[in-house]
Amino acid sequence: MKFLINELSFTGQAKNDNEAYELLKNLYDIIQEVKPIQNNYPIQTHSSLSQQKILSNLTIHQWICQKIKSPHPQEQVLARFLIQILTKGPFIDNQGLLESCECYFNNKNITSSSLTGAVKLKGSLLSLQKSDDFVDETVEVTFREENQSSENVTIRNLTQITQSRKLCPRYTGTPKHDSSLKGTAPSVKGTPMDLTIKEAQEVLNHSIDYKKKRYGYQKEKNKFYVFHPNNSYDSYGYPLYHGFPISDSQVPPTIKKDLGIGKP
């Protein structure tokens, strides 16, 4: 999945230094949560983020300068992380992706923003909490490519740990597909899962969501796998899935393309 830090959510909303730290730490924690499902896509940001305000009188750049040598180790860690984000990018507005289109949010032209980037990349926003315009789990924009009609597009907007965990599937075996699990044997045996829990989780992390299922591929075994939701969550709020191997012919062509396997 692709994620973009929403620079428009930085509006100087922190009332004091402690709240500034808590807001930035929450954003940091969300980014750590979604790491396993990034599929090697780096977190994107906007080149203006360093000049956005965290307090009414303090920019992100200024906050970093204050905290990089803080006596509090946790503030140093956060400052170093932000430096990496702000210096390495990638920056959504420097890639030519935002040209030849228009994007409006709350009747304002925000074409050069990360919101437009989220539309183009089909990504999700990572927003700072307590921003009045970005409190909801989704954001709706009006988007138009050049020479095409406008359309309303809904973007996922993450501001809480619980929201990010809902995107991170967790593998759990079932007696139907895993004979090693204890408990009453099912009346009908399914295709046995031939991956360890760790291997299955890795495939699931890189899987593609398609029609209420997730499809993945394991290079070592040269096999495709399908994962079905258990329609339940673990105690931490992660959605649970079970899965098993499937044949090449059972994988939709569009999924093979998205996984980079074979031809569409």
Image: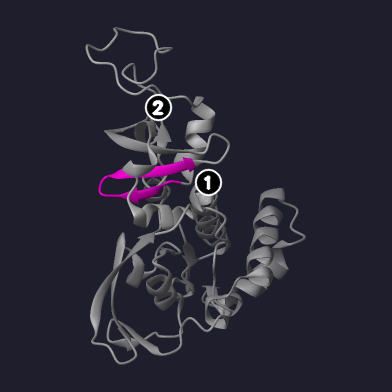
Percent x, y of residue 26: 50, 53
Main SS category, magenta section: strand
Foreground residue among 61 and 214: 214
Image quadrant where one finds the C terminus: bottom left
Horizontal relation, residue 134 to residue 48: left or right: left
Percent x, y of residue 171: 42, 32
Q: CA distance from mark 2 to mark 1?
A: 17 Å
Q: Quadrant of residue 179?
A: top left
87 versus 80 height, above or below: below
Q: Quadrant of residue 127?
A: bottom left
Q: Is residue 13 visible?
A: yes
Q: For residue 36: magenta?
A: no
Identify the residue at horizontal 29%, vertical 9% (top origin). Answer: 185
The amino acid sitting under disc 2 is: Thr
Percent x, y of residue 97: 48, 81
188 versus 29 height, above or below: above
Horizontal relation, residue 260 to residue 140: left or right: right
- Check residue 172 in the rendering and tell me which mark sits there, or answer none: 2
Identify the residue at horizontal 39%, vertical 64% (top origin). Answer: 130
Identify the residue at horizontal 58%, vertical 75% (top origin). Answer: 91
Q: Is residue 238 visible?
A: no
Q: Quadrant of residue 108?
A: bottom left
Q: Secondary structure at mark 2?
A: loop
Horizontal relation, residue 197 to residue 77: left or right: left
- Check residue 36 in the rendering and tell me which mark sits there, or answer none: 1
Please give the range of residues in magenta. Answer: 207-217
Percent x, y of residue 238: 38, 38
Identify the residue at horizontal 26%, vertical 12% (top origin). Answer: 186
